[in-house]
């Protein structure tokens, strides 16, 4: 059986994207693998489960309705508090036309500093 070893994001400004995702997830930057390695890889801190996120320079356009996106779960302070925290880090709000179905947790769609959309759902 396979497992997710890393999530890779194409970004226009890797340093800015890394600062956002590090603040959003509490991830730490991995040391470059060799001199000149320009990939930025963020990992969960020691003792925390999760897949690393890698950022590489990309000039491709951001999709309005991406085929793949990240889903985050809000912490114990609740959905709105988490959304406000992420907006404070540079996330943008998206006027998303779809809502959670009956019995599903509420969610909010945001963009990271690169315009990539992601969801934040209730804890």
Image (cartoon, rainbow, N blue to C red):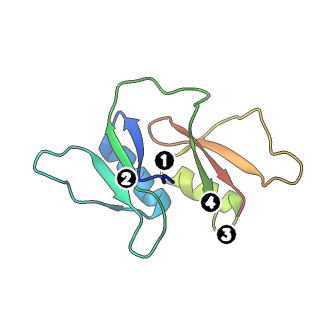
Asked which secondary structure carries label 2, the reply is helix
Asked which secondary structure carries label 3, the reply is loop
Q: Does 123 sit above or below residue 97?
A: below
Q: Earlier in the sequence, mark 2 or mark 3?
A: 2
Q: Earlier in the sequence, mark 3 or mark 1?
A: 3
Residue matched to label 3? 77
Residue matched to label 1? 90
Q: How far apart are labels 1 and 2 at the CA level?
A: 10 Å
Dot in front, 3 or 1: 3
Q: Earlier in the sequence, mark 4 or mark 2?
A: 2
Look at 32% across and 52% down and name the residue there: 41
- Whether residue 116 sits left or right of residue 12 in the image: it is right
Q: How far apart are labels 1 and 4 at the CA level?
A: 13 Å
Q: Which of marks 1 and 2 is nearer the N terminus?
A: 2
Q: Which mark is residue 26?
A: none
Q: Does 1 sit above or below residue 39?
A: below
Q: How far apart are labels 3 and 1 at the CA level?
A: 19 Å
Q: Which mark is residue 19?
A: 2
- Whether residue 48 sits left or right of residue 42 in the image: it is right
Dot in front, 1 or 2: 2
Q: Earlier in the sequence, mark 3 or mark 4?
A: 3
Q: Do the residues labelled 1 and 2 touch (CB within 8 Å)?
A: yes
Q: Which of 20 and 1 is in front in this view?
A: 1
Q: Looking at the rendering, which quadrant does residue 76 occupy? A: bottom right
Look at 77% across and 52% down and name the residue there: 106
Look at 51% across and 36% down and name the residue there: 116
- Whether residue 97 sits left or right of residue 52 in the image: it is right
Q: Quadrant of the C terminus?
A: bottom right
Q: Do the residues labelled 3 and 4 touch (CB within 8 Å)?
A: yes
Q: Where is residue 81 drawn, in percent x and y?
A: 65, 62
Q: Does 63 sit above or below residue 79?
A: above
Q: Which mark is residue 82?
A: 4
């Amino acid at each position: 059986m396979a497992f997710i070893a890393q999530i890779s994001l194409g970004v226009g400004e890797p340093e800015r994207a890394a600062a956002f995702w590090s603040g959003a997830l509490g991830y730490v930057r991995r040391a470059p693998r060799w001199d000149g390695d320009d990939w930025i890889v963020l990992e969960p801190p020691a003792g925390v489960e999760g897949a690393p996120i890698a950022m590489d320079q990309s000039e491709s356009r951001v999709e309005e309705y991406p085929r793949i996106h990240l889903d985050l779960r809000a912490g114990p302070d609740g959905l709105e508090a988490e959304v406000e925290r992420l907006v404070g880090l540079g996330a943008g709000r998206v006027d998303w036309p779809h809502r959670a179905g009956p019995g599903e947790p509420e969610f909010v769609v945001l963009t990271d500093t690169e315009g990539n959309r992601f969801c934040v759902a209730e804890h």
